[in-house]
Each structure stands twice: as C-alpha cells, then as structure tokens.
Image (cartoon, rainbow, N blue to C red):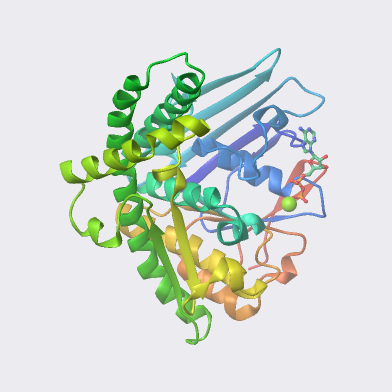
Amino acid sequence: MLITHVDIDGFRNLSNISFVPDTRYNIIVGANAQGKTNLLEALWIMSGCKSFRGSKERDYIALDKSRFTSEMKIRDIVREQKITFEMTKGANITKNITINGVKQKGTRNLFDVFKCIAFIPDDVEIIKGAPEKRRNFIDMAASQLNPVFVAHITKNNAVMNQRNALLKSIMQGGSDSSILEIWDKQAAHEGALISYMRDGYVKKINEICGELYYAISGGSEKLELEYRSNVYKPEDFSEPCGEAAFEKYYRKLRESAEYDIRTGITHSGVNRDELIIKINGISAKEYGSQGQIKSAALVIKLAQAEIFMKRSKEAPVIFLDDVMGELDENRQRFIFDIIKDMQVFITTPNESALLPDIKGKILRISGGRLTEEKADE
Ligand SMILES: Nc1ncnc2c1ncn2[C@@H]1O[C@H](COP(=O)(O)OP(=O)(O)O)[C@@H](O)[C@H]1O
Ligand SMILES: [Mg+2]
C-alpha cells in the first residue's frame, strides 16, 4: 500500500503542504516544534483512527483558522483511491469525508482503504501503561486484519454503557433487575467473540514477537505475550467460540450481577482483561529495564506489521516518529530489514542520525511549511 499524493492545509501548524511521496523512504527533517509529528498525525488520521497523540479533534484545526482540509491518494494492489477529509470548527466540529468522491457518514470506511502502523515514543505505554492501553492495542491491531472486529468492539462498548447505566438505575430503584438479563445475553455474545478474537491475535503476535525479540536481543532474551481473560481459562480457547463460550461468559456476568448493581459498574468481561507481557519469564511492566521496554514495544509493533503483511499480502504504510535517532546501528538495521518492502515516513531532527543507506525523499519542514529535495544518490 502506497500513499501517492498528499495535500494538507490548516492541520495544526501545517500550511499548504502538497507532495508526491517516495515509494520507499520519506524523511521528514526539521528542528523541534516545526510540524514533523503534525505531518505524520495528519496522514495517520486519514486511516480513520483517532490521533496517536490522544488529542481532541478540535485541536487538529490550526488555531488561527476555522478548518483544515486534506486529500490523499492511496494505491493498493487493486487500485488507487482518493480520500478527502475536512474538518470545520464552529459551535461543534463538523467532519466532511469522501472516499472516491462518495460522501461518508463517519470515519469507519477509511479504515478499510488506508492501513498504516505508527511507531512513536509513547509506544512504551503498551508495556508500562494501564491495561486499557494493551487492550486498545490488541483491538486496533486485530481490527486492521479483520474489520468485522470493529463492529463487535463498537457493539460491546454500547452494550456496556447501557449495562452500566442500568446498574446505576437499578441501584437507585429506578429499574427492575430482571432487565439486566437481557443486556447480559447481548454482552455475553459480543464479549465471547471479542475474547476469542483477542486471544487468537495475541497467539499470532506472540509467535512473531518471540522470534524478533530473540534476534534483537542478540539471542539472549525471551519475550512472551499472553492474553489473560477473566472469564476463560487458557485451555478454553482451544475450542472455537460457540454456545458453550457464550454460556460461560453469560454465567460470569450473572454471578457478579449483584455486586455490579451495588457498585454501579461491570466487574467482569473483556473490559477487565489483561495482556501479560513477560521478558525472560517475568513481567516487563514491573521489572523491565528502560531498554528492554523500548525494544519490546518496538518488536510488538514490528510483529503487527509482519502479521498484517503476511495476512493481507499488502504492506501497511509505516510511520516512525522520532524513534530512529535513539537506536544504535544494529537495531536500525533490524527494523529496516523487516519493513524493507513498505513505504516509510520517518521524522528526525537530523538526517545524519539515520543509517547512511536510508535514502529517499527529504521533506524539510519549518514553521509548518514544506520544502522537498531529492537526497544525493
Ligand atoms: N492547533 C494548532 N494550531 C496551530 N499550531 C499548532 C496547533 N497544534 C500544535 N501546533 C504547533 O505545532 C508545533 C508542534 O509541531 P510538532 O509536529 O509536534 O513538532 P515536531 O516537529 O517537533 O514534531 C508547535 O509549534 C505548536 O505550537
Ligand atoms: Mg515530534
């Protein structure tokens, strides 16, 4: 998958950006606070995902403007497609998105058109952060492989919101507790499917992470990922997800219903699950060194790219934000070897920090404006 054309204006400090990316390396160079990450972020949101910085949509629009516009062409094995994304700031934020000229209701279909993976310094949060960070990572990575998954996540979130609202209402005497069973049936259905899909994805990524981490650590360390469900035992996942799985999930919800009503929140199910990440058999979150955590985060993302590539026969576009400069030559080589068939956008304050054989289009950015040059061959 390739980005073949980009136009962006009014996104944060970016002004009148227009370029044809290199099919391999695009090196975004600039001093601090000039708009390097903004450029990656503007490209990233065209995939329908929320900002990798966790920013609010309102902040996307330049402070001195009332809207931003962007247009991107994406070529995959089948065809070239055009996405336009426009956001206007008023009392509310309004979005106007088209794919191949067809107006879209929301961002959802973007996810099918444009697949990308971003490596950012914040990725260490996958290891160090709250369990939700890890759940979100699996959900996003698994959705990229199988967009059906997004529908289950969305449905489950809606059902959980309803269930939690109902719990509070029952607690306050406003609703009858028998209604809860109806929601629990639905929650069990979505929850079981999500548990099984997550476990399946974690098994896949675990296999690849194991190999990659072994290699990146010079054959001395072992990285393991394991999905820990609070409903199912690991052996439950050896059977496909069916009636028995729905029933088990449903029973778990029913068992904790009384406690849930008293406290007003759901205590079991997929929103409480964990992804356990271990290095040499012990928790990376608790005991990992900074270097181990960084390498593990990097390896997990590389594994995501590799799985996607194998499965869809299509390479995702790779964004590397400020991660290369800190890595030694061996690690840089290791990464570039894995992403060698992918289109890459790399930000760096200084292109000399990159391996000398990383040549491509240099995109210099200053004050949100771009000048391009072709690197010396
Ligand atoms: N909504 C906005 N409107 C205008 N400028 C913004 C907005 N959001 C961020 N910026 C500016 O963008 C710059 C930071 O850009 P960034 O891409 O993070 O820099 P870097 O090149 O270091 O990656 C800062 O100068 C900041 O003031
Ligand atoms: Mg930056």
Residue 178 visible, this orientation: yes
Which residue is rendered at x = 49% and y = 47% of the image? 136
Q: How many marks?
A: 0
Q: Quadrant of residue 26?
A: bottom right
Which residue is rendered at x = 61% and y = 30% of the image? 70
347 or 77: nearer the eye? 347
Q: Position of residue 117 (x, y in %)?
A: 51, 52
269 or 102: nearer the eye? 269
Residue 356 visible, this orientation: no
Which residue is rendered at x = 53% and y = 52% of the image? 131
Residue 86 placement, left or right of 156: right
Relative to 153, residue 97 above or below: above
254 or 293: nearer the eye? 254
337 or 178: nearer the eye? 178
Q: Position of residue 193 (x, y in %)?
A: 29, 42
Q: Quadrant of residue 330?
A: bottom right
Residue 233 placement, left or right of 1: left
Q: Quadrant of the C terminus?
A: bottom right
Relative to 328, residue 50 above or below: above
Residue 247 placement, left or right of 229: left
Q: Position of residue 29 (x, y in %)?
A: 74, 56
Relative to 319, residue 249 above or below: above
Relative to 213, residue 189 above or below: above
Which residue is rendered at x = 74% and y = 44% of the image? 370
